[in-house]
Every structure is written in C-alpha cells, then in structure tokens.
Image: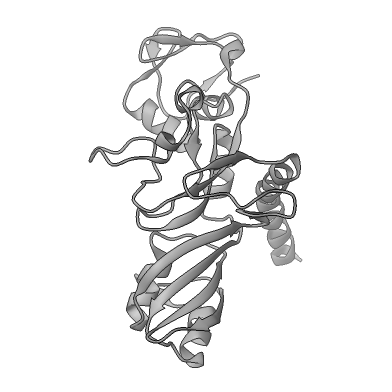
Amino acid sequence: MEARLQKILAQWGIASRREAEEMIRQSRVCVNGTVAHLGQKVDPYQDKISIDGKPVLAEQRPSKIYLLLHKPAGVVSTCYDPQGRPTVLDLLPSTLRTGWGIHPVGRLDVDSTGALILTNDGELTYGLTHPSHSISKTYRVVVQGHPPAKVLKNWSQGIVLEGKITRPAQVRLMENYIDQSCLEIVLQEGRNRQIRRIAEQLGYPVIKLHRTAIGSIQLKTSITAFLASGKYRHLSGDEISFLSKQIIRVPEDKAKLRSKINT
C-alpha cells in the first residue's frame, strides 16, 4: 500500500517525520535509484528505498522504543549539536544511541531540567509535536521576585507573545522564598522558551525551570522510584497507550468542531 515517503521513514523509526522531510530536501533519499522528492508516494514492499546510498528494507525496521529521560541542565534536546555540547542521546547506552532512530519528542532548553520523552516512533513524535496538539506539560518554576495574584491570573488567561496570545494555562503559587517564588505551571502548548519569555516580559525572570510531568507521565509514580537526573526508563504499556490516545484525539476534535460549525 502506497504512502508518502516521509511517513514511511517515520513509521520505520528511521527519523521523525520532520527529520525525514529534511533528509528528502537534502537529496539524501533515493527511490528505485532516483533522488526522491518531498511528498512522493512509495510502496515500501515494492519500491527500493535508500538513504545516503544504503538500502533500507522493511524487515530492518527496528522495534519501537519509548523512553522517559530526566534531562539535566547543560544537555541539549537534539540528536546532534554543532557546538559540541552533550546531547540527550549521549545519556543513553551505546546499544541505544545509534541504529535505532531514537530522538526527543519536543524540547527542553539547555538550562531546563526534567521529563523528556525519547522514541523512534516518528508518527507519535509528529502527532505530539503538531501545533494543533495540546498534551499538558507540568513545570515547577522558580522566578525572581514575588508576582502578585493579579499577575498570575493574567498569565493564566494568556499573554501576548510576538503578536499572538498564548493558550490559557494553570499558574499557581507554590511557595514564597526571601526574594524568589516557586510556581507550578501547566501548559497546553509549547512555544519556544515560552515560560522564560513570559516571565521575563512580566518582570519576574526565571531562575530554575523543571518539567515534572508530560500528561500523566511523571518522573516518579506509585510503582516506580524517582528517576534521577541523567537517567532514563522505558515507558509502561499504560503510558504508551496514553500517548497514543492523545494523538488519535486531535483529528477527532477537529471533526467535532467542523460538525458544530455546520449545524
């Protein structure tokens, strides 16, 4: 059965769909000996696909892997860093680091810490990082100063960043220190450095930012010990099922919206 080439490469765990698209743009992918083009449809069991001159076969598709990593500060959330900084893949054993197509789902900036999902399931990555998606992410954030209740309310209702208002968020005060405050923030979107930029804009710059959970997936659960910084664990079947249901829900919600508009 034919499907778009980038989708096939993502399903095979070779790269995320966006990474596969970039590989095709760079003319690294060939189909039946001819350089492929973006959007090209192929039959994975009839057409011969190669990347960088090496054939890729359906039988070579690696098993799907789903990991939760506790990212430490100073590590970048990419597979490769041109500046030579350590990446999240460097925290994995050599048996997982290469040959599996593992990559991070979304990002935590280099100074931030906490929960980050790694997988070689390109379709899952595409679904969870698509702008229309809204899986919640929970953060503990230490900011400079003591933002009053009015500021936190405004933050929760949405703040204009680059001409576009952010989605409503949960923002609550957890604890006050001498000259700092600890907030719990739950986002339904993930713009680049969103929390840090909003906090700076409001006059309460971030001192520390730590992601504690992605949806219901946490660094510590009732059946698992706290995941130490720099360590990883495999997701449970229930956690994988939760993520799969999240991406299935996106088109269904759009269909419901269209139905409401047309009635």
The image shows residue 20 at horizontal and vertical percentages of 44, 30
The image shows residue 175 at horizontal and vertical percentages of 52, 82
114 vs 202, left or right, is right
The image shows residue 85 at horizontal and vertical percentages of 28, 42
Q: Residue at x 33, y 83 (%)?
A: 203
85 vs 50, left or right, is left
Front residue of 227/51: it is: 227
Q: State whether residue 233 is above or below residue 110.
A: above
Outermost residue on the left side: it is: 83
Residue 13 in view here: yes
Q: State whether residue 60 is above or below residue 230.
A: above
Residue 161 in view here: no
Instruction: Quarter of the image for the C terminus: give it.
Output: bottom right
The image shows residue 138 at horizontal and vertical percentages of 57, 64
Q: Residue at x 40, y 7 (%)?
A: 33
Q: Residue at x 48, y 80 (%)?
A: 155
